[in-house]
Amino acid sequence: LPPTQLDNDMAVRMATGLRRAAGQIESGDQMQIGPFAPAGGIAASAADMGRWMRFHLNGGELDGKRLMSEATHARMLSRQFTDRPGAPDLAHGFQNYSIHGVGLFGHGGSTGNFNSLMLFAPELGFGIFASQNSGSGSYSTVNLLSRLMIEREIESNGGSIEVELNTTEADLIEYAGDYRNNRRSHITLTAAFGIQPTASVQAADDGSLITTINGNTDRHYPVAGMEDTFINALGQTVHFQRDDSGRIIVLNDTSGVHSHERVTARGMPWAILLPALLVVGLTITTLLGFWKRFRRQPETTDAGRRGARRAFVTAVGVSIYGILALVALLAISRISVATLSDFPPTALTMFSYAGWGLLILTALLLSGLMPVWRGSEWTIRRRLHYTAYALALPILCAQLWHWNLFGAALI
């Protein structure tokens, strides 16, 4: 059951999630898992997780009882795809990667103010489950603890944790660029929440790659005999995938569960920010121009009057749209793990539907473009201003559509 639906006997036994706010530690809200969130909603104790790992380390058998055939269990720990055998990937739900050549299976999970990680190494007969009741620092604590335990186990079994780092004289510039995590919405309005690139890659002068993934910068070196695969000093690998033409299009990071799609120019934040700023500027100058000319410089032609009305109505409509956007942003900023079940807020819904109105205004402005140039008798400067406004709006609408900010399902 979700935390807020537990009876009193169970509720008092629940750990309190903590978070850091204004330099202090305070209790945090409980996350309510719903169909909109990428979570399985599984709750288990540390003891249960221990039994779960023993089951897998014993090849589908626990306490002398076989619950899964050896063949079926082996298939469960196999990968469903073979596109990157030496790099992190998924094996029927398990994150599968290696540390110092030792294969690991497991998964991490977070509910805002709780972070957990379960890993087991069949070849070592070893598993570890770590959980923390604080969201501060993300997975850094459980990751470090798990890694140290695994490295100690590797060394106690005669293995080595030394990593051989190779450089190359090959040009690595083809890997350089920005990448965006594919673990995001692609078809709903929330696609815009993932507009910021999550990874960047630079080619270093020493024949390695400098990678920044989710804010963590590292250096990866080519793995001998493994194309498009690179390793860091901790023995963790990243892998790049190519399209049919051989162009790098995806970065697979060290987690085994995250892939990052290469970002094209249209997908960069500035590609929507620049036309938005241009439209804002043209809207303001259109309204100022209308106020300046109102009753002082009457239009001398029908085409001029119609063009002026189109520009004014569009500017007012764009202003209303901008206000709705600000209200929607304010509503989004107030969302917390305790209020996810109320998503989407009404303001965001209204903003999404308002996009159709913006599209109508764009068509209205475009319809007056030719009459303005042919019969308005405006100055060249004013006609160019109208033209810039009429052309900037469809570019903005195209970007808004591209990021599902209108015309897409809300959730």
Image (cartoon, grey):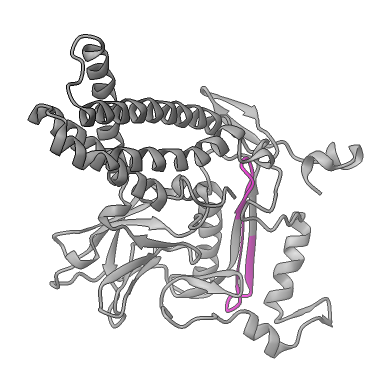
Q: Is residue 116 magenta?
A: yes
Q: List x then y, in percent, for residue 134.
A: 61, 39
The secondary structure making up most of the magenta span is strand
Image vertical order of residue 47 relative to residue 303, above or below: below
Task: Judge from the rendering whether residue 54 lies leftward or rightward of residue 363; answer left or right.
Answer: right
Q: How many marks?
A: 0
Q: Could you tell me which residue is drawn at 53 percent across and 49 percent down?
A: 139
Image vertical order of residue 150 relative to residue 27, above or below: below
Viewer-proximal residue, 62 or 244? Answer: 244
Viewer-proximal residue, 257 or 195? Answer: 195
The residue range painted magenta reads: 109-128
Q: List x then y, in percent, for residue 136.
A: 54, 38
Whether residue 243 is visible here, answered yes or no, is yes
Q: List x then y, in percent, for residue 105.
A: 58, 70
Viewer-proximal residue, 176 or 87? Answer: 176
Q: Could you tell me which residue is drawn at 33 percent across and 27 percent down?
A: 315
Q: Could you tell me which residue is drawn at 75 percent across and 40 percent down?
A: 15
Viewer-proximal residue, 407 or 163? Answer: 407
Q: Quadrant of residue 32?
A: top right
